[in-house]
Image (cartoon, rainbow, N blue to C red):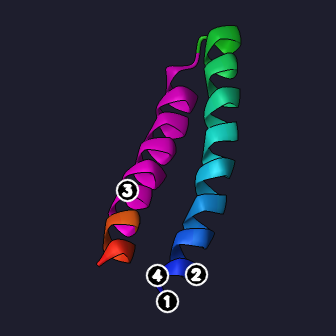
Amino acid sequence: MWDTILFINSILWAIASIYFVYSVGAAILKWDVRIFLYGFGWFLFFLITEIILGGLKKH
């Protein structure tokens, strides 16, 4: 069960990473900090979830 959830979260984390890179560029070009914060927030959320699910999978 944890393997499936971890796999789905890994895909979402990869998508969030791509969006984070986009948001950094958009924040620089458009001087819009809000898009950067959204991208950074989603990236951190999925990163922390990945760490937690990885720990749960080992037990």
Task: From the image, tell me which residue sits under label 1.
Answer: 1
How many angstroms separate mark 3 from mark 4 (CA)?
Answer: 12 Å
Residue 4: numbered disc: 2
Contact check, label 3 and label 2, Cβ < 8 Å: no
Residues packed near mark 1 inside 10 Å, few (<14), some (14 to 19) or many (20 plus): few
Q: Nearer the viewer, residue 15 or 25?
A: 15
Contact check, label 2 and label 1, Cβ < 8 Å: yes
* Amino acid type of the residue that numbered disc 1 sits on in the rendered structure: Met
Task: From the image, tell me which residue sits under label 3.
Answer: 51
Residues packed near mark 3 inside 10 Å, few (<14), some (14 to 19) or many (20 plus): few
Residue 13 included in the magenta stretch of the image:
no
Q: Residue furthest front?
A: 58
Give the residue displayed 40% in from the left and 65% down from the top: 54
Q: Which type of secondary structure does the marked residue at label 3 adopt?
A: helix
How many angstroms separate mark 1 from mark 4 (CA)?
Answer: 4 Å
Above or below residue 43? Residue 2 is below
Contact check, label 3 and label 4, Cβ < 8 Å: no
Task: From the image, tell me which residue sits under label 4.
Answer: 2
Residues packed near mark 2 inside 10 Å, few (<14), some (14 to 19) or many (20 plus): few
Give the residue displayed 44% in from the left and 58% down from the top: 50
